Amino acid sequence: MYNTCNIILCIKGASINYATWECIVYGMAHAKDLAPLRKKLYPHRLPSMSPKLRPRGTVFRNPIGTGWCMPFVGADQPVMRRSQYFFHEKKGKRPLQLQCYFTIPSFANVVSFVIAGIFLSIFTKFKWGRQLLLKVRFQYFLFNLNN
């Protein structure tokens, strides 16, 4: 019986609205606060699974399509993990190991995305940086992922 799942999101073009941008800014700013909350939310660890799902590299070629894949750091994976925790704790079901990735069309877009991530991680650490990111038109900070 398999207990692993790699999810690869293939997105054709991307755009986000202001509320999503605001969630990204504040989510990155308060990421360090999540560990204690998750310890309270999940008091027991899930059982160790075998074979263990090993994460792929930070950047790799899409094995089922075109483009490059990177780990997806959105809220989807924690939500799926919470569902697996619930199924195990409340219904006694075997948990599924999950890894989420998303596809970027070209390696140049990967480089742009990494630069934007570094930029965001620096600016979201400071109150003035968060204010700047939210005040200035957020489209200036995004890269077009269309081919």
Image (cartoon, rainbow, N blue to C red):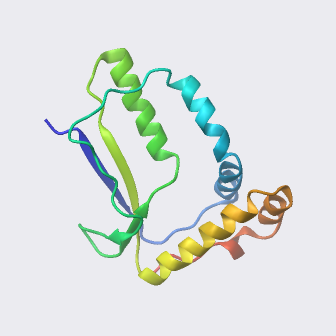
Q: Measuring 84% from the left and 55% from the top, which residue is drawn there?
A: 127
Residue 64, image x, y percentages: 23, 67
In this picture, is 99 found above or below 70?
A: above
Left-right relation of 103 to 5: right
Left-right relation of 86 to 24: left
In this picture, is 140 found above or below 79?
A: below
In this picture, is 81 found above or below 41?
A: below
From the image, which quarter does the N terminus lie in?
top left
Residue 14, image x, y percentages: 52, 68
From the image, which quarter does the C terminus lie in?
bottom left
Q: Quadrant of residue 112?
A: bottom right
Q: Total marks drawn?
A: 0
Residue 106, image x, y percentages: 41, 81
Q: Measuring 81% from the left and 57% from the top, which residue is drawn there?
A: 126
Left-right relation of 53 to 26: left
Residue 17, image x, y percentages: 65, 60
Q: Measuring 52% from the left and 46% from the top, which residue is drawn there?
A: 75
Q: Residue furthest left?
A: 1
In this picture, is 38 found above or below 10?
A: above
Left-right relation of 56 to 142: left
